[in-house]
């Protein structure tokens, strides 16, 4: 008898189920209800996780492959699905060699579609021709809901104020580390985003974000103080539970590639 079969038989004996009954149920229905749910501990009737084929990791030369359920926002070929953030019209940034590049003076760009809670993947690289210092070097930003900024900046041997460092939740929380690669090398943001919840004019659940940059955790489930501001305190006013992904034109030739997201719909708990 295999170890797994032996364990199944033991648990069937302990619970009073036959092995056949356990196999058909995949679990138990005589165990306690998990608080806050309608499901028993080890409930075999609880909905199964959906099957997702994982993607592949990027290299410096090639972007990776998104997971099978991803919404691809930029695949390196066109800016279809992107528009100007501040006025009508298509996004005016340059696309070549599998990346998009900021065209200074054309303004921020955003997705035409809006999204709620998401897992977001973005890759970026700073210009190899180094100009400026501090906030004036390789500056851009990733805005969730078009309001909440995760900082993009070339901080390779280039210090600035901590809550404006690459990967910062701008103006609120410095990153736990500066994990930027050299200019010209690709960096990877993986962001888990949960938008705020409002009850009338009151924020019930603040926005929450986790940021992993080049495999290094910069923020874990940090609660934001409100949408991003510059030189003033942030604060909440009610807004929709969804919004676009926005990329910033800060005047620097920052490049982006391999942008995709996965929607984190409400789970059936």
Image: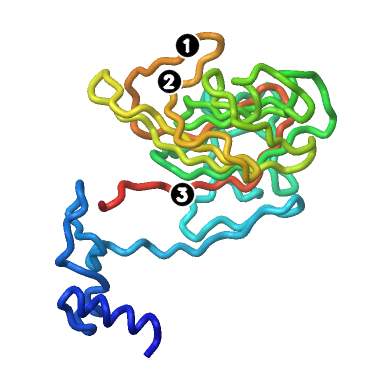
How far separated are the C-alphas under marks 2 and 3? 25 Å
**Element marked by disc 2:** loop
Q: x, y (%) of residue 118?
A: 44, 43
Q: Are marks 2 and 1 in contact (CB under 8 Å)?
A: yes
Viewer-side residue, 196 vs 6: 6
Considering the image in quadrants, where does the N terminus appear? bottom left
- At horizontal 57% and vertical 32% (from top left) the residue drawn is 142
Viewer-side residue, 208 vs 263: 208
**Element marked by disc 3:** strand
Q: Which quarter of the figure has residue 236?
A: top left
- Residue 10's disc number: none
**In this view, 77 is above or below 183:** below
Asked which colour scheme the image uses, the reply is: rainbow
Task: Specify whether 105 is left or right of 175.
Answer: right
Q: Which quarter of the figure has residue 39?
A: bottom left
Task: Read off the residue under disc 3.
Answer: 262
Chain-order first, disc 2 or disc 1: 2
């Amino acid at each position: 008898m295999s170890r797994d079969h032996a364990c199944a038989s033991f648990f069937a004996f302990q619970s009073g189920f036959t092995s056949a009954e356990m196999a058909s149920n995949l679990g138990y229905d005589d165990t306690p209800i998990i608080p806050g749910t309608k499901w028993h501990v080890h409930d075999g009737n609880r909905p199964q996780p959906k099957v997702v084929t994982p993607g592949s990791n990027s290299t410096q030369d090639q972007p990776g492959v998104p997971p099978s359920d991803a919404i691809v926002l930029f695949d390196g070929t066109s800016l279809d699905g992107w528009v100007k953030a501040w006025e009508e019209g298509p996004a005016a940034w340059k696309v070549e060699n599998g990346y998009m590049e900021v065209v200074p003076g054309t303004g921020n760009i955003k997705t035409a579609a809006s999204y709620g809670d998401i897992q977001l993947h973005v890759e970026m690289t700073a210009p190899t021709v180094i100009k400026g210092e501090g906030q004036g070097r390789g500056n851009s930003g990733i805005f969730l809901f078009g309001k909440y900024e995760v900082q993009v900046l070339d901080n390779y041997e280039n210090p600035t104020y901590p809550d404006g460092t690459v990967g910062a939740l701008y103006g609120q929380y410095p990153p736990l580390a500066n994990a930027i690669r050299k200019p010209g090398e690709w960096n990877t943001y993986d962001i888990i985003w949960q938008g705020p919840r409002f009850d009338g004019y009151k924020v019930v659940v603040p926005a929450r974000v986790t940021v992993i940059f080049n495999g290094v955790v910069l923020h874990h489930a940090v609660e934001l103080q409100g949408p991003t501001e510059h030189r003033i305190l942030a604060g909440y006013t009610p807004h929709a539970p969804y919004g676009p992904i926005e990329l910033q034109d800060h005047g620097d030739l920052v490049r982006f590639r391999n942008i995709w997201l996965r929607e984190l719909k409400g789970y059936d708990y």
